[in-house]
Amino acid sequence: MIEEELKEILKKLEAAGWQPQLCDTPIPVYESVHAGNPEDVGQIPPDMILVPKAFLSMYPESMVRVKGNSMIDRGIEDGDWVKMSFGRTPHDGDIVVVAIGLDCTLKSYYEDEDGTVWLVPQNKAEKEKYKVIRLDEDASDVHLCGVVTDLNKPLPRVPDKDMRGLVNDAKANYMEQPRISDRCLQSVIREMAPLVKMGRQWYAVFKPMEEKSVYSTNDYAAFCERVKKEVPEHKHLPTADELQRMAVQSFRKPVRVWNPKDAPVQGKRFTAYLQIGLKTLGLLETTGDEL
């Protein structure tokens, strides 16, 4: 088939409502993944397949066959193919491929409030068989091979009963939280206002309120409106965009575990944020229903 004929076929497919793409970019395919850096993933040279260029990201990628059913609740079963991206930084909830010694495993990534990394299986039916794995940061035989970005089939719909159970658990947890009165919020915001020297520092007031379920995660807009209502003459009123930019690194975690080595600000600025956050948290915990 000559190039002109191929172009004509693509035009007809597009006119019919299809979105054809040429498989013109080679990527490696591994039956399994071994320990080592990305270039050492396979001891045997991998096979290559051609995929559309749009299918790929800026990171080196490969296709890997899954063995086992430890991730079946995420729709990943034995024999499935996943696309793995090298060089990405994993975040909580990402599915990662990690080599531990000569063994390789595919699990969900999770970092707890102490900074410990865990690999979490997703198979409730066989939870005794597939255990949560704690990663020792000093272990020399642990290597992150890559982050899974795509599966070779649509992910399944989560059953309503499972969703209902999770929501009910969240409701029960919310009900256990001490009630923070409207009067208390008013008092806390007004008391913390003099300590805030720039708009972004209001994040250190918002985060404790999020911890106490006063505001839901990322509900920066509602918080900003409340601050403007309580202290409208403040020189450094917050904006939702400013606060969202601060929700990174250890600042995503509870205030009491903020870490100066892993924070978006350093030195005296970190100390200022931490002091504001701890004082806000203390006020919420000690006043609560008293106001």
Image (spheres, rainbow, N blue to C red):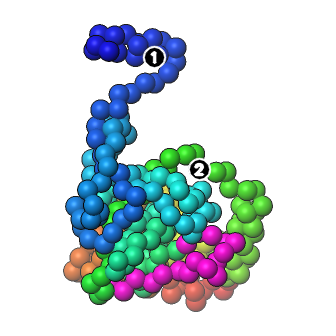
Q: Residues within 10 Å of mark 1 (few under 14, many from 20)?
A: few
Q: Residues within 10 Å of mark 2 (few under 14, many from 20)?
A: few
Rendered location of residue 98, percent (x, y): 38, 71
The answer to which of 224 and 39 lies nearer the viewer is 39
For label 2, the residue is 155
- Contact, CB < 8 Å: mark 2 with mark 1? no
**Which residue is rendered at x = 59% and y = 56% of the image?**
75
Rendered location of residue 103, percent (x, y): 39, 76
**Which residue is rendered at x = 26% and y = 71% of the image?**
36
Q: Is residue 131 above or below residue 166?
A: below
Rendered location of residue 162, percent (x, y): 73, 63
- SS at circle 1: helix
The answer to which of 72 and 108 lies nearer the viewer is 72
Q: Tell me the amino acid under the disc marked 1.
A: Glu
Rendered location of residue 81, percent (x, y): 47, 52
For label 1, the residue is 14
Magenta residues span 121-137
Q: Quadrant of the N terminus?
A: top left
**Which residue is rendered at x = 34% and y = 42% of the image?**
49
Side of 161 relative to 84 (left or right): right
Q: Tell me the amino acid under the disc marked 2.
A: Leu
Can residue 225 be seen in this snapshot?
no
- Which mark identifies residue 236? none
